[in-house]
Image: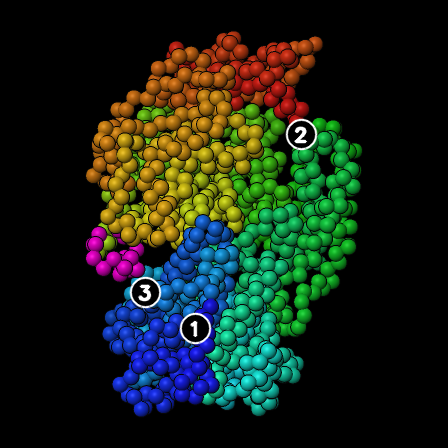
């Protein structure tokens, strides 16, 4: 906090001597300006007083800022604080209007997260918006708040608005244009960083800043603004309609600035109109902003307004404006419509609280000195923070407190909506579901009930309760000891309380009831209507009891039979819902917004497909996408299998139609629909792909050698259950796992991307004008050519959705300083996964946006950078993902980790390193230093046992030169490809007892190729019988590949024989369309139940390799048999 000077004015000897003259004397502001300077015109402000320098900095009276050339420089530097605004561009005879959102918010958040080692990685920004008429002093007031903080920095280092001119033609014009965003030094780097939004003055007009700020519209996300009634939106319209709609929604506090106390009534009317624009264009807003009206430097004094009675100014304000509700026709009509009798009631309809604050006019009479002004500024700061805290508490209680990452996503939705020109209000509840899907059982139940009864609460009342009961029964049957269930056990106290909470949700009505168009209907909070909670819960309990009664009566005590019975009954309940219209996909907005083009088609994303839970059971994670676009979980894929009983085969399920909506439209590639899943006794096959820029050609060349050795005419990605990649490895993961490219296709695409994607940005490699380049040349290479190249490779295919035989695929990316995943098996949450309802080319951009080389990728409002900043070798991430998907006790057939080459020294630090943001330099330096992935591999291999390590293959090459190639060295691609094609990989001898290879191969790649082929076979358990201390195991060796295909024929032909506990078993002759059911049996003493049992396959070579899941213990086989 700036300290008060104790010296008094040498002229009046009453007020503090804030101003030190060049002659050495100290005066109050009034005496210095009106008396001392008149007598001594050659004197000037001087001295080193912190207070005096602060006042000079705040007001802009320092000499350098008043000179036109310096003001131009300040405006140009202040351009970096631009957040969003309207930009009109003339194209020939036409005007193109866009709403432009810059990276300002993202940059501030990233800086706050990386501010110190103690800065929280999850932060909840609070925005205070400053609005008011032109010339009211918004910019100067924000400068005051920034200057008078505990966390004092040198004034010249503080970012703050350029203050308005006091003389000349500029004094009559707005100073700041559009909306700028500034940080509060005190809270920067904390859990709740405060940001100040400086909004262009309400009167509009061309601001002074516009003369000097020309670059910002070129470097943001641009949303085409549709004409209104055939007319283009102008600056004044944007100030009065677009800006209020956005700031009202997302601000915790609105500061309305006015100078003239005599025009309080006019200010109140303008304020109501401004807030009405925001309030009536938003529905389901969970918390209203607080309002602070600042009487900023009026020509009036009132000692009561600076007294300990903090509400004195507020009371005087409402007394002054009270008659306006009768005199003003607009206010009178508003009050009549809603039954409001006072101005406070009208304002409280749009705000959570109203407070009026007074700041004296500098140099005016007795209160216009720093001894009064500084404490009033400090009081205003405290009030803003306390009001913001109260609003954030309301947001938290209503599940709508967004962290920085989520806010960025919601901002994007809001900007798209504003630019669309839609008359529909912005629906906060829909964007909340897009950003924060429920992650609790309570949330899942509430989401499903809301969906079922949204348009037909009475018609679907009983059916929804029955389905909820059925879901509870089906889930309870998955638990151990669930052979015979009682209703009181299934629908226990915890589930009853959960169900009761979810049907009594009371959020989203902070402004009272609103119609769908945003208009207010009535006062009050949530109204349940004729929804009877007790009756609903009773129906749920009755449904549970009825299902269990029928099951216990008609189904034998076989776990599998009971699960299938419950599933079939559940299918009938879903089909019996009276009103099925809720399954249809509603559009969030009416049109799709193209960043740079016209509005062309209905918006592609919708609420129906993106569910936080499988709607077929309400407990599983939605993962498998059906032809109708609904998504269900793995358990429902299996339990709703409609394959005829005598044709069923492990690892494959067939659905004749959607279990949810009943769709059975018989089109090519539609219904009936087959889905492959991992057989029960098979283990995980994992591929991990390092990042490395153009060095990605090395891992592709190694994969090409494997593909050639296998030679089964099968998409290479189908050899793996999970593929995780970073950067260049992420691109390969998407190509192999999502698009089913062959390795040769991936190589061709990779070379094309390197050829077309590295297009130099103008001036990026210049060493001159560093700060200017850093502001407006964000990367060495252009973004558009790279994105066009990616689009030509990946098209518009959506990432999310586990389909057919496709692998599960995840790519790493970095948001701020944290690592996240984009996965085709996870919708996204607010913790580990980003929203995956994006095209694969966008996911490719997110994982490979290396700082300095390329701009960050925008993903739902977040800035994503190269995943290698945190996880360049993602093998540890991949193994942890496998545990997340399949459980902590998951076992692996094979873990393949592919690197991008190593040398004695890492690549050199690029000359353009200054372009990397300061908070990111450490991560980027670490990436360059550890690009070869060795440290991550050593960390992983030292943390696992020999049994798992024997399943791992780390494949990379050693460069002949001493320094690793640069990640953008496209000229080195051919040489690296040749090196990887001829490199020799030696087989590593196993260290444990559960080794996957029986024999002594010499070549690691050949052995790995055979192991991947062996993993296509698996064991299906038929029975385990006990004879004294010996277990007799019977079952079948099966094959994952479909019969009648070339890959199946080749595999069977190349299979010489199987070794079942070292006993040779030959493959029978199969018809072309016949599946492999090779019956085998073996014995094992119970005392050896933890020893390895082997089933191996020989491909006519000197060694054999394990089939999937083997070597296996008798203990695991028994556990599986008990669960069946």
Mark-to-mark CA distance, 2 and 3: 63 Å
Residue 194 lies, in percent from the top left, at: 48, 63
**x and y percent of residue 1105 in the render?**
45, 17
Kind of element beneath mark 3: helix
Q: Is residue 599 magenta?
A: no
Q: Position of residue 1074 (x, y in %)?
A: 50, 21
Mark number, residue 144: 1
Q: Is residue 995 above or below residue 807?
A: above
Q: Residues within 10 Å of mark 2 (few under 14, many from 20)?
A: some
Lower sequence index among marks 2 and 3: 3
| Residue annotated with mark 3 | 216
Tell me the CA gap for discs 1 and 3.
26 Å
In front here: 890 or 772? 772
Q: Is residue 1091 left or right of residue 972?
A: right
Image vertical order of residue 994 relative to residue 687, above or below = above
**Are there few (<14), some (14-19), or many (20+) residues within 10 Å of tag 1?**
many
Query: Which residue is under mark 2?
Result: 560
Q: Residue at x 35, y 27 (%)?
A: 955
Q: Nearer the viewer, mark 2 or mark 1?
A: 1
In terms of depth relative to the viewer, which is nearer, 560 or 158? 158
For the point 60% across and 30% down, which residue is it? 644
Segment colored magenta: 765-782
Residue 563 showing in the rendered view = yes
Q: In the image shown, does 1107 or 580 lie closer to the viewer?
A: 1107
Q: Toward which corner of the image does residue 510 lie, by quadrant?
A: bottom right
Whether residue 313 can be seen here: no
């Amino acid at each position: 906090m700036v300290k008060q000077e104790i010296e008094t004015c040498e002229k009046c000897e009453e007020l503090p001597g804030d101003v030190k003259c060049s002659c050495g004397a100290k005066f109050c502001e009034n005496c210095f300006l009106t008396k001392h300077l008149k007598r001594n015109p050659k004197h000037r402000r001087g001295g080193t007083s912190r207070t005096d320098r602060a006042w000079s900095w705040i007001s802009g009276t320092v000499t350098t800022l008043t000179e036109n050339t310096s003001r131009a420089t300040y405006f140009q530097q202040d351009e970096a604080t631009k957040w969003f605004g309207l930009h009109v561009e003339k194209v020939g005879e036409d005007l193109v209007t866009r709403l432009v959102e810059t990276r300002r918010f993202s940059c501030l958040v990233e800086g706050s997260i990386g501010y110190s080692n103690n800065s929280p990685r999850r932060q909840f920004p609070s925005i205070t918006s400053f609005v008011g008429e032109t010339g009211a002093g918004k910019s100067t007031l924000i400068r005051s708040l920034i200057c008078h903080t505990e966390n004092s920095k040198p004034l010249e280092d503080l970012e703050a608005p350029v203050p308005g001119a006091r003389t000349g033609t500029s004094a009559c014009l707005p100073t700041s244009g559009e909306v700028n965003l500034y940080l509060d030094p005190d809270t920067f780097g904390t859990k709740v960083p405060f940001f100040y939004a400086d909004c262009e003055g309400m009167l509009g007009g061309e601001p002074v800043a516009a003369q000097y700020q020309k670059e910002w519209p070129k470097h943001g996300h641009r949303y085409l603004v549709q004409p209104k009634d055939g007319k283009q939106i102008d600056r004044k319209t944007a100030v009065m309609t677009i800006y209020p709609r956005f700031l009202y929604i997302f601000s915790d506090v609105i500061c309305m600035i006015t100078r003239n106390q005599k025009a309080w009534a006019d200010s109140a009317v303008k304020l109501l109109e401004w807030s009405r624009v925001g309030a009536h264009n938003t529905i389901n807003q969970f918390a209203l902003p607080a309002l602070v009206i600042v009487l900023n430097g009026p020509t009036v004094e009132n000692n009561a307004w600076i007294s300990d009675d903090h509400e004195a100014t507020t009371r005087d304000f409402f007394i002054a404006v009270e008659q306006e509700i009768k005199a003003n026709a607009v206010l009178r009509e508003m009050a009549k419509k809603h039954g409001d009798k006072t101005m406070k009631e009208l304002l409280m309809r749009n705000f959570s609280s109203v407070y009026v604050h007074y700041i004296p006019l500098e140099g005016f009479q007795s209160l216009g000195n720093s001894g009064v002004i500084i404490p009033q500024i400090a009081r205003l700061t405290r009030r803003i923070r306390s009001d913001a805290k109260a609003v954030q508490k309301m947001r938290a209680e209503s599940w709508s407190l967004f962290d920085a990452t989520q806010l960025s996503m919601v901002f994007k939705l809001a900007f798209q909506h504003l630019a669309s020109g839609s008359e529909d209000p912005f629906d906060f509840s829909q964007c909340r579901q897009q950003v924060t899907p429920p992650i609790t059982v309570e949330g899942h139940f509430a989401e499903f009930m809301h969906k079922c009864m949204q348009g037909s609460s009475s018609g679907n009342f009983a059916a929804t309760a029955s389905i909820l009961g059925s879901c509870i029964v089906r889930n309870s049957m998955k638990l151990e000891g669930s052979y015979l269930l009682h209703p009181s056990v299934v629908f226990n106290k915890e589930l009853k309380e959960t169900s009761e909470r979810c049907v009594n949700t009371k959020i989203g009505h902070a402004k009272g009831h609103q119609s769908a168009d945003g208009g207010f209907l009535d006062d009050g909070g949530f109204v349940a209507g004729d929804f009877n909670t007790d009756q609903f819960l009773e129906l749920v309990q009755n449904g549970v009891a009825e299902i269990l009664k029928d099951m216990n009566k008609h189904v034998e005590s076989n776990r599998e039979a009971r699960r299938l019975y419950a599933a079939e009954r559940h299918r009938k309940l879903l089909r019996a819902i009276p009103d099925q219209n809720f399954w249809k996909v509603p559009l969030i907005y009416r049109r799709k917004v193209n960043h740079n083009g016209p509005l062309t088609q209905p918006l592609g994303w919708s609420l129906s497909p993106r569910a936080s839970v499988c709607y077929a059971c309400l407990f599983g994670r939605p993962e498998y996408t059906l032809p109708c676009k609904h998504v269900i979980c793995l358990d429902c894929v299996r339990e709703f299998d409609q394959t005829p009983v005598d044709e069923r085969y492990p690892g494959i399920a067939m659905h004749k139609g959607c279990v949810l909506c009943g769709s059975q439209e018989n089109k090519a590639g539609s219904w009936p629909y087959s889905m492959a899943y991992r057989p029960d006794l098979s283990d995980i096959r994992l591929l991990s792909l390092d990042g490395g820029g153009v060095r990605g050609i090395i891992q592709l060349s190694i994969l090409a050698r494997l593909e050639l050795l296998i030679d089964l005419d099968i998409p290479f990605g189908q050899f793996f259950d999970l593929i995780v990649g970073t950067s260049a490895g992420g691109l390969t993961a998407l190509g192999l796992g999502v698009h089913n490219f062959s390795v040769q296709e991936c190589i061709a695409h990779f070379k094309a991307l390197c050829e077309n994607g590295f297009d130099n940005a103008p001036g990026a490699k210049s060493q001159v004008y560093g700060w200017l380049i850093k502001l407006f040349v964000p990367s060495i290479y252009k973004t558009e050519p790279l994105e066009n190249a990616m689009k030509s490779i990946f098209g518009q295919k959506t990432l999310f959705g586990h389909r057919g035989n496709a692998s599960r695929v995840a790519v790493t990316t970095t948001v701020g300083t944290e690592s996240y995943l984009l996965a085709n098996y996870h919708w996204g949450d607010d913790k580990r996964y980003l929203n995956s309802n994006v095209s694969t080319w966008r996911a490719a951009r997110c994982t490979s946006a290396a700082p300095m080389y390329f701009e960050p990728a925008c993903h739902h409002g977040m800035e994503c950078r190269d995943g290698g900043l945190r996880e360049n070798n993602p093998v540890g991430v991949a193994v942890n993902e496998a545990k997340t998907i399949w459980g902590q006790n998951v076992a692996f057939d094979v873990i393949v980790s592919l690197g991008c080459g190593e040398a004695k020294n890492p690549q050199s630090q690029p000359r353009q390193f200054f372009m990397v943001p300061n908070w990111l330099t450490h991560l980027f330096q670490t990436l360059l230093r550890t690009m070869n992935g060795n440290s991550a591999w050593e960390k992983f291999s030292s943390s696992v046992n020999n049994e798992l390590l024997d399943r791992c293959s780390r494949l990379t090459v050693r460069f002949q030169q001493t320094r690793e190639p640069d990640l953008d060295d496209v000229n080195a691609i051919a040489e690296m490809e040749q090196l990887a094609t001829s490199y020799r990989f030696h087989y590593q001898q196993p260290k444990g007892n559960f080794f996957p290879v029986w024999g002594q191969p010499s070549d690691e790649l050949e052995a790995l190729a055979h192991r991947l082929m062996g993993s296509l076979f698996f064991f299906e358990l038929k029975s385990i019988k006990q004879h004294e201390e010996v277990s007799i195991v019977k079952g079948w060796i099966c094959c994952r590949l479909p019969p009648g295909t070339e890959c199946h024929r080749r595999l069977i032909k190349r299979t010489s024989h199987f070794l079942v506990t070292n006993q040779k078993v030959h493959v029978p002759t199969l018809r072309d369309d016949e599946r492999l059911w090779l019956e085998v049996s073996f014995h094992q003493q119970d005392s050896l139940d933890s020893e390895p049992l082997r089933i191996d396959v020989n491909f006519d070579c000197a060694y054999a390799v394990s089939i999937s899941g083997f070597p296996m213990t008798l203990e695991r086989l028994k556990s599986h048999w008990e669960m069946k």
